[in-house]
Image (tube, rainbow, N blue to C red):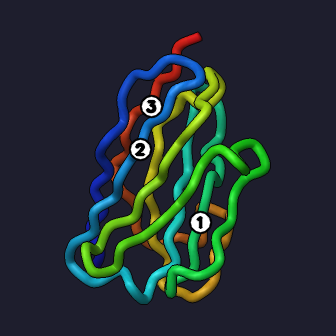
Amino acid sequence: QVQLVESGGGLVQAGGSLSVSCSASGRTISSYAMGWFRQAPGKEREFVAGMRWNGGSTYYADSVKGRFTISRDNAKNTVYLQMNSLKPEDTALYYCAARDGVVVVTVDKAYDYWGQGTQVTVSS
């Protein structure tokens, strides 16, 4: 079992930056593919960014490419999402997820463990 806890969300003005973290416990996440998803009110949960288990390849949704960066520190059992040039449409509940596998998948049902989410609100 893996427990995931997100932190670092908050309120920021458009154009600003925010970093959210995901701390894992229970098992080391070094063997898991990690992903960040988000869900805005009235919308389906969507893939934001992902990273292979070994910290190699990264993947991003087109809507955040060039603005968001996913990274991981396996020694700290933590995954990060650095968000720059934030837009009001980035407002959502952001979730961290872990998948017991090598590759990153953009479908939320493929992930085995989820955090409770952290709110990110971008004001215009």
Task: Tell me the residue at 48%/84% (across/down).
Answer: 100
Which dot marks residue 120? 3
- Which element is circle 2 on? strand
Which dot marks residue 19? 2
Q: CA distance from mark 3 to mark 2?
A: 10 Å
Across and down, in percent, residue 68 comes to: 60, 48
Q: Nearer the viewer, residue 17 or 121?
A: 17
Tell me if label 3 and label 1 are in contact, CB under 8 Å: no
Please name the amino acid that badge 3 sits on: Val
3 or 2: mark nearer the eye: 2
Label located before the other in sequence (1 or 2): 2
Assign the N terminus to one quadrant of the image: bottom left
Assign the C terminus to one quadrant of the image: top right
Label located before the other in sequence (3 or 1): 1
Which dot marks residue 83? none
- Which element is circle 3 on? strand
Q: CA distance from mark 1 to mark 2?
A: 15 Å
Vertical comparison of 91 with 6: above or below = above
Across and down, in percent, residue 105 comes to: 66, 72
1 or 2: mark nearer the eye: 2
Q: Nearer the viewer, residue 104 or 83?
A: 83
Extreme residue in the left direction: 26
Please name the amino acid that badge 1 sits on: Gly
- Which element is circle 1 on? strand
Find disc 1 in the rendering and name its residue: 50
Task: Tell me the residue at 45%/71% (across/down).
Answer: 98
